[in-house]
Amino acid sequence: ELPLDHSIPKKNNLNPKYTFDTFIIGSFNEVAYSAAQAVIKKPGSFNPLFVYGSTGIGKTHLVQAVGNALVASNPNLNVYYTSSEKFLMDYVQSLQTNRINQFKEKYRTCDILIMDDIQFINGKERTQDELFHLFNSLYEMNKQIIFSSDKHPNLITGLEDRLRSRFNHGMIVDVNVPSVESRLAILQIKTRDYQEKIPSDVLQYIAETIQGNIRELEGVMTSILGYIQVKQQAISLVDVKNLLKNSVRAKKSISIPEIVKMISDYYHIPDVYIYNKTRRKDVVKPRQIVMYILREDFDISY
């Protein structure tokens, strides 16, 4: 049977470990954090709140922390967290068992609906149709809706325009890759949780070397803590370097002028044209590609 009947008040699906007490705030997520705090203070103020960014950088932690904070401040609030995949499965199962009314009631009675990884409903027309009507119902009642995705709603392929329009109606915030300082703060939090003494030079090395997402940092910390437990001894910087030598990705050392040169050569134009104010068609496109690559792949500021 589907777990539909009056299940939300008793089970909100929130992970209790995802709170703001363990959430690191930095330049990479401060706008998203501020928007989340505004929602906590006044649900419905940003509706929907749409958080996007690459995998493993804390989106799930952020949106669930909002839910946990709201439950803590008002236990009577009907908060429900789900993924778009789980929403799809619920919908399909309700159709198969002729319980679509229970399905609708389950989601429409939410005070706060948090849906993770919304990009997975791309191409699922009937599920998108159901989500569209659910969105309208909750929005009209001023119920808070929060979505997360790995990309901006305008870049999600296979998404109906009317649903894309609803996503764009609220506040859209992005979460970027954390800076070295933020990565170091995250590592310090992790070592505090595990109550293991790890030298500061080791943490600094990891923060500077592992340039991927937060999930990669957590994986490295798990490896290091496992090493300490197996060896039953303190870990040194040399030990960490040996431990990580096969898992560290090469740093991006290419320069901005080199990228401009590559792209201008590809389009057979002088690289100085990229910097000119001209709006010639044969220059505008290469310039936009340069800007896109520098921002998306190399995280250069706007």
Image (tube, helix red, strand yellow):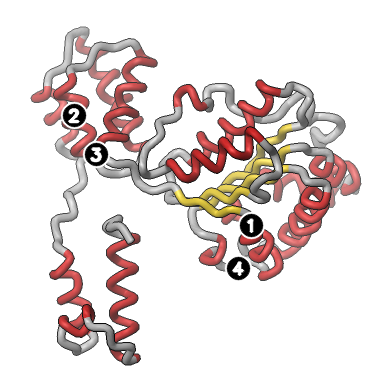
How far is disc 3 from disc 2 in space, using C-alphas?
10 Å
Vertical arrangement, residue 36 with respect to residue 14, above or below: below
Vertical arrangement, residue 272 with respect to residue 107, above or below: below
Residue 265: image x %, image y %? 17, 83
Judge the density around disc 4: few (<14), some (14-19), many (≥20) Cα neighbours within 10 Å: some
Vertical arrangement, residue 232 with respect to residue 100, above or below: above
* Circle 2: residue type: Gln
Judge the density around disc 1: few (<14), some (14-19), many (≥20) Cα neighbours within 10 Å: many
Residue 158 numbered tag: 4
Residue 210: image x %, image y %? 24, 39
| Residue 252 visible to the viewer | yes
Residue at image coords 14%, 24%: 201
Residue at image coords 56%, 31%: 65
Judge the density around disc 2: few (<14), some (14-19), many (≥20) Cα neighbours within 10 Å: some
Give the labeled residue for mark 3.
210
Task: Give the mark nearer the N terminus: 3 vs 1.
Answer: 1
Q: Nearer the viewer, residue 163 or 119?
A: 163
Image quadrant occupied by the C terminus:
bottom left
Q: How many marks?
A: 4
Residue at image coords 66%, 65%: 165
Q: Nearer the viewer, residue 37 or 50?
A: 37
Q: Nearer the viewer, residue 79 or 251?
A: 79
How far is disc 1 from disc 2 in space, using C-alphas?
40 Å
- Residue lying farthest top? 232
Give the labeled residue for mark 2.
204
Give the labeled residue for mark 1.
121
How far is disc 3 from disc 4 in space, using C-alphas?
34 Å
Q: Quadrant of residue 158?
A: bottom right
Task: Give the mark nearer the N terminus: 3 vs 4.
Answer: 4
Residue 52: image x %, image y %? 50, 51
Q: Please give left or right for residue 66 compared with residue 206 in the image.
A: right
